[in-house]
Amino acid sequence: MAPPIAPAVTPGTTAVVAFPDVGDAFPATTVATLGPDSATVGGSELQPITLVNLWSTTCVPCKREFPDLQAIHDRYATRGLRLLAISSDATDAPVQKYIMETGSTFTIGRDPSKAVLAHLDARGAQPWTILVARDGRILYKSMSLVGNRDSRLTTAIETALASR
């Protein structure tokens, strides 16, 4: 069984963490995936260049953007981009059902306690999309729908892949 999300903030603390901005470090996060593994993003060790998407099956805009996320994955996965969509759904069942319906092939993580959203001070709003460099720096962030033709995102991905 994959490990649970590693809390980035000590439970019980009242510190408010402002959402990191482009250029800031993405907080080291480990999430359980729907497969047998876990996925780590951020931290001091080099990771794959990762496009992180925070979503849930109850979020209509999140579901609307899934075809674009799949297109981004299809376009860049062979060049070294990992796409990690982290669901805040309480259970696996609706997530697994939605993935089967859409045929999505990128990595799906789970954050049922919403620890990642809380640590990023995302206040439950979704979708969020963050491009994280190999060294853990944030290269791009969006607090709304992204598209596979979004020039800012495309430029950030292309630049990150070219510099790895």
Image (cartoon, rainbow, N blue to C red):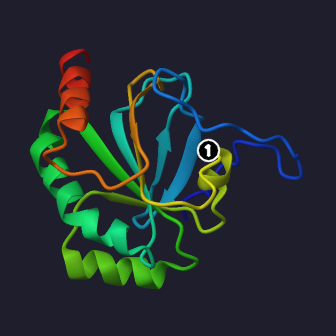
Q: Is residue 156 above or below residue 128?
A: above
Check the picture and name the quadrant holding the N terminus.
Answer: bottom right
- Taking the spot 47% from the left edge, 20% from the top edge, the residue there is 23
Q: Is 4 left or right of 60, judged from the image as shown?
A: right
Instruction: State the image coordinates of residue 73 (x, y, percent, origin top left).
Output: 19, 50
Residue, disc 1: 120
Instruction: State the image coordinates of residue 74 (x, y, percent, origin top left).
Output: 12, 51
Check the picture and name the quadrant holding the C terminus.
Answer: top left
Instruction: State the image coordinates of residue 118 (x, y, percent, origin top left).
Output: 67, 53
- Taking the spot 48% from the left edge, 38% from the top edge, the residue there is 41
The residue positioned farthest toward the top in the image shown = 163
Q: Is residue 93 above or below residue 85?
A: below
Q: Quadrant of residue 65?
A: bottom left
Q: Is 114 left or right of 70, judged from the image as shown?
A: right
Q: Residues within 10 Å of mark 1 (few under 14, many from 20)?
A: some
- Taking the spot 47% from the left edge, 60% from the top edge, the residue there is 126
Q: Nearer the viewer, residue 15 or 115?
A: 15
Q: Is residue 30 above or below residue 62?
A: above
Q: Is residue 159 above or below residue 153?
A: above
Q: Nearer the viewer, residue 31 or 51?
A: 51
- Taking the spot 24% from the left edge, 15% from the top edge, the residue there is 163
Element on which disc 1 rests: loop
Q: Is 89 left or right of 101, judged from the image as shown?
A: right
Q: Nearer the viewer, residue 33 or 23?
A: 23
**Figure label count:** 1
**Residue type, label 1:** Leu
